[in-house]
Image (tube, helix red, strand yellow):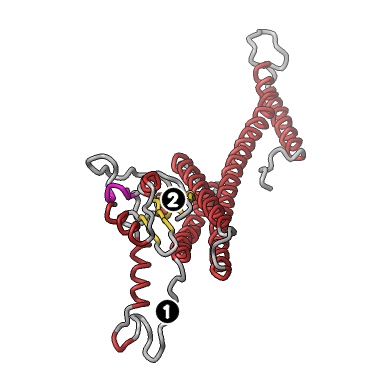
Amino acid sequence: QAAIQAALQRLTGTPLLEFHVSDLLNNQLPSHYDFTSVYDVLVFRRLAATERETDTLNGGVASNEVARPPKRRGGPSALRRIDTSPVGFAVFGRVLVTVHPVDCTVRDHFIDRMLSQVTPGPQGRAPGTAPGRKALIHMPDSPAELMLRVIDHMVDGYLELRRRLTLQLDHWQSELLDEHSRFRNWQALLEARNTLHQLQDIAEDQRGALAEWLQTLNEPGTPFVEREMLQVRTRDTIEHVERVISHVHRLEESLESAIQMHFSATANRTNDVMRTLTVLTAIFLPLNLITGYFGMNFEAFPFIKHPDGLWWATAVMGLIAVGLLGFFWRKRLLEPSNR
């Protein structure tokens, strides 16, 4: 830190304030924006490359002396990978200071990309350039533009996550609406809903930080062409973040709808069972009344000693049962509710 502060003092004439340094090194800080008269500070949370959030202050190890194993999370594999870590930016007029976690692939991506643009490869062309073609070199015009490129690359990671989330939640919706399966992953479903809420909160913090940064670009002091370009890039990045928010919101709504439809289908099946049992009870109730009436222990009882009394009673009971069955069938009480 001392070497970086000394370099900033030499290059810009102003080091970072202590509380800004602590903010940039805080692993739990949400996305936010702050500024001074000399530099701007922007913290943006990105998707972590692994299932653990690395600590920028202690070199990738949590605040304890011994690194603890990451806590296993339930739910689909795509939802278990939604872990974020902060990336800090301090934007000066000619210098950009970035604070990354140890396992940050975004930093390595831009370092390799910029080195490939400025370092010629064999035969005087940039690495990865086809023979006979010139490399398209477009370096950032300002530290602010470089910061926006890095942020836009991090937002693309959230956009890529949408496809995996959609596939995972579509599988759960199909399982919820399947009449022949019993859904048992309620704990994992609850954790998935909480994860979607967390992702929406993260994206809203990102949008708020970028919106505050966009407002400061309207202030005088920046050349018109550069300010216009930065505003266009910032609005484009905000649009990407809003797409993430809207997609997460749609996923939450579709998941809630699937849950409500699951409980509605379960209630309908329960109603079908209860209706069938009620019809059977209504049919057998008069039959039980007849058998109970002739089952009373009296010596002098009409038809009790008639030679055809059993068959007459059976015929009457059969007619009553068939009549009630036909009555309930005409009332459509024996049809399933999904017809």
Residue 137, numbered label = 1
Up-down relation of residue 58 to residue 222 (above or below): above
Residue 326, image quadrant: top right
The residue that appears at 47% across and 49% down in the rendered structure is: 31
Q: Position of residue 276 (x, y in %)?
A: 64, 35
Q: Are marks 2 and 1 in contact (CB under 8 Å)?
A: no
Q: CA distance from mark 2 to mark 1?
A: 38 Å
| Mark closest to the chain's N terminus, 2 or 1 | 2
Residue 87 appearing in the image: yes
Question: Observer-nearest residue: 274 or 255?
Answer: 255
Single out the residue that lies furthest toward the top.
Answer: 299
**Magenta span main SS:** loop
- Given the image, on which type of amino acid does mark 2 rest? Leu
Residue 308 in sight:
no
Q: Which of label 2 and label 1 is nearer to you?
A: 1
- Measured as percent of width and height from the top left, residue 245 is found at 56, 53
Q: Is residue 98 above or below residue 200?
A: below
User: Which span is picked out in magenta?
Assistant: 54-60
Q: Tell me if mark 2 has few (under 14), some (14-19) or many (20+) residues whose alpha carbon lies within 10 angstroms of its own.
A: many
The image position of residue 248, as x and y in percent, is 54, 52
Provide the secondary structure element on which disc 2 rests.
helix
Q: Quadrant of residue 329?
A: top right
Q: Residue at x 29, y 44 (%)?
A: 62
User: Residue 18 versus residue 266: which sits nearer the camera?
Assistant: 18
**Of residues 197 and 264, which is closer to you in this image?**
197
